[in-house]
Image (cartoon, rainbow, N blue to C red):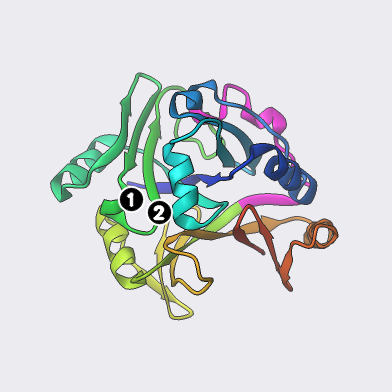
Amino acid sequence: MWLRLRQICLVAEKLAPVEEALCDVLSVKVCFRDPGVSTFGLENALFPIGNQLLEVVAPVQANTAGGRYLERRGGDGGYMVITQCDDHAPRRARIEELGVRTVLDHDSPEFRNLQLHPKDTGGSFFEIDEVLGPDAHDPDGPWGPAGPDWKAARVLDRVTGIAAAELQCDDPAAVAGRWSEIAQIPLIEESGNAVMPLDNATLRFVPCTDGRPEGLGGIDLLTADKAAILASAKARGAVSGDSQIHLCGMRINLL
């Protein structure tokens, strides 16, 4: 069984300025706006990065889960790590065996979704999905949450993939162990941090060092033009290191 990193979701107080910054700095384009998120009092935009997706959601009404998450984490930042699997049934059985609660549980002929409760995972929302139908398991295949034609908006001039997600945790070893237990993937160690290798990326579990609570604190992007990204970020005062920028409350490491 494989498990891929297919989508990263961020949450912002306001969508438009974050969308504008991402398009300017990363040279990405919006491929889809999901009307279904209005059910949760949100609006969103999705951007292809290689064969993965970056999503930003923002509340459009009071007292939403997204709005409460913004309050808990003290502003814009990471929200969800969304993975794709090749066989949903044993994943569901494992989650039930461990007694992990779900926030969303969807099963249709085209798409199966399990969004796990962050109080039972630690670190962040962890989602495990499966696409069904023609070319469903192709790395470049369909992805329902990104709309029917997400590849038409793909731009590869500056960024070409999401190589890692970084979860900051009060107890990184415990959270890493929990995610490993759920995913049934053994952990490895890199630079003193627990890391869970996926089929196409890694999940890195690190201590909280930025004054913010647990959450998805950063991502690593594969780049085709790091210099152009840094130049655009510098114009916005968003450069935070030699190969790092800071957008939507996120550390974005440029590889």
Q: Secondary structure at mark 1?
A: helix
Residue 225, given in percent of the width and then of the height, sits at: 79, 57
- Residue at position x 31%, y 38% in the image: 103
Residue at the (35%, 19%) spot, across then down:
109
Residue appearing at x 61%, y 35% in the figure? 46
The residue tagged with tag 2: helix, strand or loop?
A: loop
Q: Is tag 1's residue or tag 2's residue first in the polypeptide sequence?
A: 1
Question: Crowding at label 2, few (<14), some or many (≥20) Cα neighbours within 10 Å?
Answer: many
- As drawn, is 36 to the left or to the right of 132? right
Q: Quadrant of the C terminus?
A: bottom right
The three-letter code of the residue at mark 1 reads Pro
**Residue identifier under label 1:** 118
Question: Which span is picked out in magenta?
Answer: 144-161
In the rendered image, residue 145 lying in the magenta stretch gets the answer yes
Viewer-proximal residue, 56 or 132? 56
Taking the image as shown, residue 250 lies to the left or right of residue 38, namely right
Residue 200, position as x, y percentages in the image: 50, 53
Residue 85 sits in quarter: top left
Q: Three-letter amino acid code at disc 2?
A: Ser
Label 2, on which residue? 124
* Residues marked 1 and 2 touching at CB (< 8 Å): yes
Q: Quadrant of residue 95?
A: top left
Q: Is residue 200 above or below residue 190?
A: above
Asked whether the viewer can see residue 80, the reply is: no
Decide whether residue 116 is among the magenta residues. Answer: no
Left or right: residue 118 versus residue 163 is left
Q: In whole angstroms, how far apart are the C-alphas of marks 1 and 2?
A: 6 Å
Give the percent coordinates (x, y) of residue 22. Answer: 71, 46
